[in-house]
Image: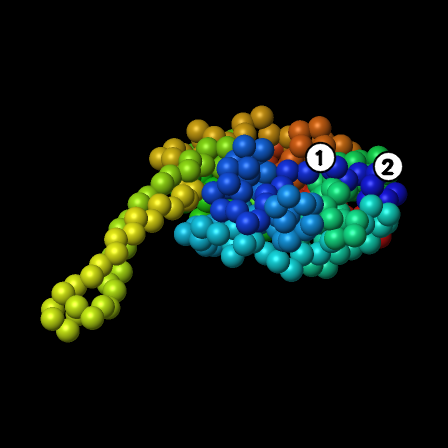
């Protein structure tokens, strides 16, 4: 199977020259965590910008300075196994598809899992690919704290526990993207300019008002935005069946439960790529 068989052709992208707030609004509008950046008026690929870039440098207003320029790319004719291997080795999730340096599509980890592995009839159980060390969050945790837990742990989704320690939901970075608010702040900058009049005690100043946009989470708790109807698997569920459940709900991680319904692990879509080799 080739990249062209599973890639997304109708790509959401940002343009440079451009400002960061325009790209941020695209992420929020389409509820995605990263988009390619192309040269304005063309489809020439210039870089990629992700939610992590905005979190790392929220004050940067120029998209060209915020985006990542060194981007791994692929072509429509590439075998998806080579792309999957690159995802596993480099630990990233999306790859622009280019022809003659121009953007023609994008392929992600989820594309391979949802559109390829789900159809491969891989009967191997997911137990081999699940992670038993899990970062969780209490359902009463403020969203701002939950976001920091995700950032510090490097996790994209967290199972949510109730007061009894039982799983009551799951919250992911896309759930947070849905409730992020764009706030504006304006501050005054006074720049003093030297002139001949300075020797006589005159003071020349230019006042510049700088407006910046950034992401802010509302004062809500995890239980207010978490997904309550959680799709799960057991450790005996096959790889392809797990991929099918992920594809049906368009999710990237899925909790693993035992016969009593207790949480025992998590399966990430990128881990399922290993089943291809």
* Badge number at residue 121: 2
Occupied quadrant, residue 5 = top right
- Work out whether residue 97 can be spotted: yes
Label 2: few (<14), some (14–19) or many (≥20) C-alpha neighbours in 10 Å: few
**Location of residue 140 in the rendering, given as x and y in whole percent from the top left corner:** 40, 35
At 42% across and 38% down in the image, what residue appears?
182
Along the viewing direction, whichever of 2 and 130 lies nearer the viewer: 2
Considering only vertical position in the picture, is 169 above or below 136?
above
Q: Which residue lies furthest to the bottom in this view?
A: 199
- What secondary structure is found at the residue carrying circle 1? loop
At 20% across and 70% down in the image, what residue appears?
196
Q: Distance between the residues labelled 1 and 2?
A: 28 Å
Q: Nearer the viewer, mark 1 or mark 2?
A: 1
Considering only vertical position in the picture, is 277 above or below 164?
below
Work out which quarter of the rendered image holds the N terminus and state it.
top right
Q: Earlier in the sequence, mark 1 or mark 2?
A: 1
**Location of residue 64 in the rendering, given as x and y in whole percent from the top left corner:** 54, 54
- Work out whether residue 159 can be spotted: no
**Location of residue 60 in the rendering, given as x and y in whole percent from the top left corner:** 44, 53
At 68% across and 51% down in the image, what residue appears?
45
Along the viewing direction, whichever of 134 and 46 lies nearer the viewer: 46
- What secondary structure is found at the residue carrying circle 2? loop
Left or right for 74, reference 177: right
Left or right for 153, reference 270: left
Identify the residue position indicated by label 1 in the image.
10
* Badge number at residue 217: none
Left or right for 59, reference 260: left
**Location of residue 260 in the rendering, given as x and y in whole percent from the top left corner:** 62, 32
At 60% across and 30% down in the image, what residue appears?
230
Considering only vertical position in the picture, is 76 above or below 166?
below
């Amino acid at each position: 199977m080739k990249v062209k068989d599973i890639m997304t052709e109708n790509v959401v992208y940002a343009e440079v020259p451009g400002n960061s707030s325009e790209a941020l609004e695209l992420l929020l509008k389409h509820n995605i965590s990263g988009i390619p950046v192309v040269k304005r008026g063309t489809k020439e690929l210039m870089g990629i910008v992700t939610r992590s870039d905005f979190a790392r440098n929220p004050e940067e207003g120029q998209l060209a300075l915020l985006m990542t320029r060194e981007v791994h790319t692929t072509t429509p004719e590439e075998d998806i196994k080579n792309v999957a291997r690159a995802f596993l080795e480099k630990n990233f999730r999306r790859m622009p598809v280019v022809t003659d340096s121009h953007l023609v599509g994008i392929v992600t980890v989820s594309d391979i899992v949802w559109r390829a592995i789900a159809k491969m009839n891989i009967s191997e159980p997911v137990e081999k690919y699940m992670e038993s060390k899990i970062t969780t969050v209490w359902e009463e945790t403020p969203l701002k704290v939950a976001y920091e837990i995700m950032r510090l742990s490097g996790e994209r989704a967290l199972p949510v526990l109730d007061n009894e320690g039982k799983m009551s939901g799951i919250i992911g970075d896309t759930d947070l993207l849905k409730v992020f608010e764009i706030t504006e702040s304006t501050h005054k900058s006074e720049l003093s300019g030297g002139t001949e009049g300075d020797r006589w005690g005159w003071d020349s100043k230019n006042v510049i008002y700088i407006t910046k946009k950034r992401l802010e989470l509302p004062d809500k708790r995890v239980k207010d935005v978490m997904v309550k109807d959680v799709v799960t698997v057991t450790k005996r569920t096959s790889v392809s069946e797990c991929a099918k459940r992920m594809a049906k709900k368009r999710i990237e991680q899925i909790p693993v439960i035992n016969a009593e319904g207790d949480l025992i692990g998590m399966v990430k879509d990128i881990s399922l790529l290993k089943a291809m080799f």
